[in-house]
Amino acid sequence: MAEFFFHNNIATVAIRSAFYLAGIELKENRLSKSDFDAKFPGSVSGIVLTIDGLTITNHFAAQRYAGRASKKTEGLYPKDPVAALRVDNIMESCRDLQQQVSRGKLSIPDTFPILSELMDEKFAVGNAITIADCSIDEFEKFCSQKANNYQATLIEYGNIVRSIQANRKHALVLAGEKSRRGNAIEDA
């Protein structure tokens, strides 16, 4: 079992979804920012994951671990080096776009064409869910939180989310939401 400490809910969506999809038990410990900083001084990522005595503080390393150690979802992190490179690129791009929006350098609608260019039609990479889809799900939730109270942005956001969810049969949204409630994934 892995133990997971965090203080920011949105920044943990991809990790939590990846572990859920992988079938790896994850004991979650949400802390206030001050409690987190006191318990883990020097951790700048806002997350700490412990697995077999090893401490991980990098979001993407945690996602890759879940993808490679998956007990239930084959190919969550691809073995093919080009597909793995594309997964890594999408994960990094989601994080970069999130930072650009947070800094006011890009608007939320500006990010959609950029992200869409990187993705395949049905899933982020290939014909099955990967950890890149988990990062996209996290980015969608970030956009939803940021877009709150902006009607035009929400309409555009809603259109792209409906398109992505329809293509992925809601699998990631269900995984993210149901992992927090302890429910199984159901087909849409």
Image (spheres, rainbow, N blue to C red):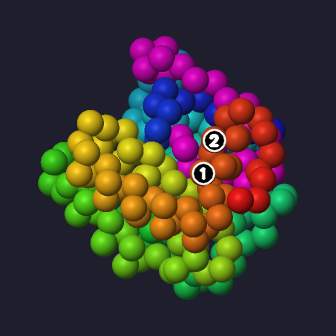
Q: Which residue is at a point 32% across and 66% down the rendered structure image?
A: 112
In depth, the one of 21 and 171 nearer the eye is 171
**Which label belongs to residue 177?**
2
In depth, the one of 25 and 108 nearer the eye is 108
In depth, the one of 10 and 155 nearer the eye is 155
**Which three-letter amino acid code belongs to the residue tagged 2?**
Glu
**Which label belongs to residue 77?**
none
Range shown magenta: 12-38
Q: Where is residue 151 in the image (x, y as percent from the top left)?
A: 25, 45
In what quadrant of the picture does the C terminus appear?
A: bottom right
Q: Mark 1 points at which residue?
A: 173
Q: Is the magenta stretch mostly helix, strand or loop?
A: helix
Q: Which residue is at a point 32% across and 54% down the rendered structure image?
A: 155
Question: In which quarter of the view is residue 53 placed?
Answer: top right
Q: Position of residue 28 (x, y in %)?
A: 67, 29
Q: Which residue is at a point 19% across and 57% down the rendered structure image?
A: 106
Q: Distance between the residues labelled 1 and 2?
A: 6 Å
**Which three-letter amino acid code belongs to the residue tagged 1?**
Val
**Is 32 left, or right, of 53 in this rendering?**
left
Q: Residue lying farthest left?
A: 105
